[in-house]
């Protein structure tokens, strides 16, 4: 699957409609972003079941602001609509492959349970 460009208009439907979405926040003027692009593209070809998306922070400032993107490139991974990884900086091809493997291995039932417990604790603390 090719890398897709995400905008605010299609962001939510992309995240909710796919199990794993890897998002690259980038800008055209950013040299490390341009260097990372072929690595990201190659990974997208190796993992057709994963959505690889790019968000141009110059054009999608609201999305970049919402996710508090302070430096680019920033890679963010969503699994079952949960942000499970967010890190600025370029990854090598092997680092990206390792990350994808870890994302696939993650026990999402456990992650969702931890989120429920955290939300319950917040509610109890507010009451």
Image (spheres, grey):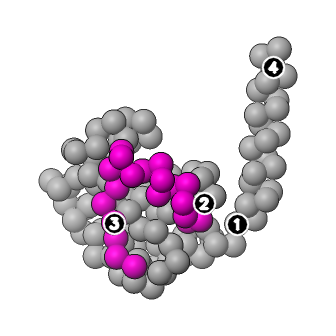
Q: Name the image quarter holding the N terminus.
A: bottom left
Q: CA distance from mark 2 to mark 1?
A: 9 Å
Q: Nearer the viewer, residue 22 or 29?
A: 22
Point out the stretch of residues depicted in magenta: 1-20
Q: Could you say which quadrant of the image residue 8 lies in?
A: top left
Identify residue for label 2: 79
SS under mark 1 = loop
Name the residue rendered at 74%, 54% in the picture: 111
Q: CA distance from mark 3 to mark 1?
A: 24 Å
Q: Residues within 10 Å of mark 1 (few under 14, many from 20)?
A: few
Give above or below for 84 relative to 19.
above
Q: Are marks 2 and 1 in contact (CB under 8 Å)?
A: yes
Q: Is residue 2 magenta?
A: yes
Name the residue rendered at 81%, 19% in the picture: 125
Q: Which mark is residue 125?
A: 4
Name the residue rendered at 60%, 60% in the picture: 79
Give above or below for 1 relative to 26.
below
Q: Are marks 3 and 1 in contact (CB under 8 Å)?
A: no
The answer to which of marks 3 and 4 sits earlier in the sequence is 3
**Direction from residue 74 to residue 30 in the image, left or right:** left
Q: Residues within 10 Å of mark 3 (few under 14, many from 20)?
A: some
Q: Nearer the viewer, mark 3 or mark 1?
A: 3
Q: CA distance from mark 3 to mark 2?
A: 17 Å
Q: Position of residue 120 (x, y in %)?
A: 82, 32
Q: Could you say which quadrant of the image residue 78 lies in?
A: bottom right
Q: Nearer the viewer, mark 2 or mark 1?
A: 2
Identify residue for label 3: 4
Residue located farthest toward the bottom when viewing the structure as drawn: 46
Q: CA distance from mark 3 to mark 4?
A: 41 Å
SS under mark 4 = helix
């Amino acid at each position: 699957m090719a890398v897709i460009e995400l905008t605010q208009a299609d962001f939510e439907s992309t995240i909710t409609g796919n199990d794993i979405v890897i998002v690259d926040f980038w800008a055209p003027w950013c040299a490390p972003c341009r260097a990372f692009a072929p690595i990201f593209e190659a990974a997208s070809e190796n993992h057709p079941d994963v959505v690889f998306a790019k968000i141009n922070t110059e054009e999608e400032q609201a999305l970049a602001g919402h996710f508090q993107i302070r430096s680019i490139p920033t890679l963010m991974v969503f699994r079952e609509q949960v942000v499970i990884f967010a890190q600025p900086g370029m990854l090598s091809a092997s680092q990206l492959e390792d990350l994808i493997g870890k994302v696939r291995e993650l026990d999402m039932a456990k992650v969702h349970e931890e989120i429920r417990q955290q939300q319950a604790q917040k509610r109890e603390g507010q009451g």
